[in-house]
Amino acid sequence: MSQLKIISRDKKVFCTQGISSILGVELIARVENIQYADACRDFLTSMGNYILAGGGLTLGQTAQYGYWLTKLTEGESNAEFFEYNQDATEFMPGLDFTLFAWMEQHKICNNAGSTFSPPRPDKLVVISEGVYEGEQVEGVRYPSPDHMSGWWITTNKYNGNVETLKTVHAYHLTKNRPDLLGYLAMEYGYRFESNSKKTWFDSKAI
């Protein structure tokens, strides 16, 4: 197997050496914010090793990294990882949001003692009135069908009538409430309160 090397161009752009024997091109990943530089290097190392191990990632294919989606996009002389924009409508250069989500969610999972278990951004979340308006929330993640993330997120405006709740895609939630993004990777059975930032496991939720 080829030996993978990661080369830093300007501390925010990283390039592989050792992938062209498989894909015909080397890989690039970049960030705008230098605070994500180390995470960007780790991302490219992970993807490069996955390809070298026969993982099957090809040009034009999407790849989920933690919570968010990336896409290996072919350029003139290389292939660069793009990320879904926060509206989930198109792929754009750079990986800042992907890596922000990765770092925030790992931090909260580590603090909570939870396995890292992010949903896909197209999975559904149950929310009550007041969530999109920025009010304090409580969240709980239940074991759920595959199309659901398992998350139920409510405010004090929720009166207990489930008919007043609605389902939204996770990417809509995180676009409107980026402060809740970090909690979504906690596994089934976990709860959180946004006001106190408290997280805990509730066996009754399982």
Image: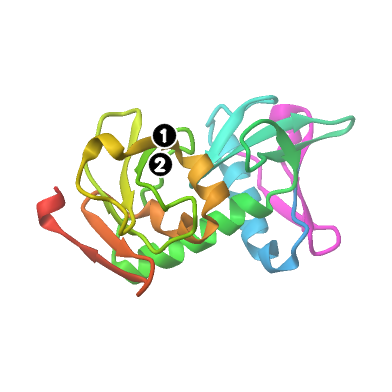
Callout 1 secondary element = loop
Q: Is residue 96 left or right of residue 199?
A: right
Callout 2 secondary element = loop
Name the residue: 60% across, 55% down.
99
- 65 or 185, nearer to the observer: 185
Furthest-bottom residue in this view: 196
Name the residue: 60% across, 43% down.
47
How far is disc 2 from disc 1 in space, using C-alphas? 7 Å
- Residue interval drawn in magenta: 1-27
Look at mark 2 in the image and give the residue it sits on.
Answer: 119
Q: Quadrant of residue 106?
A: bottom left
Q: Are marks 2 and 1 in contact (CB under 8 Å)?
A: yes
The residue carrying pointer 2 sits among few (fewer than 14), some (14 to 19) or many (20 or more) residues within 10 Å by Cα, namely many
Magenta-drawn stretch contains 4: yes
Furthest-right residue in this view: 76
The kind of residue on which mark 2 rests is Pro
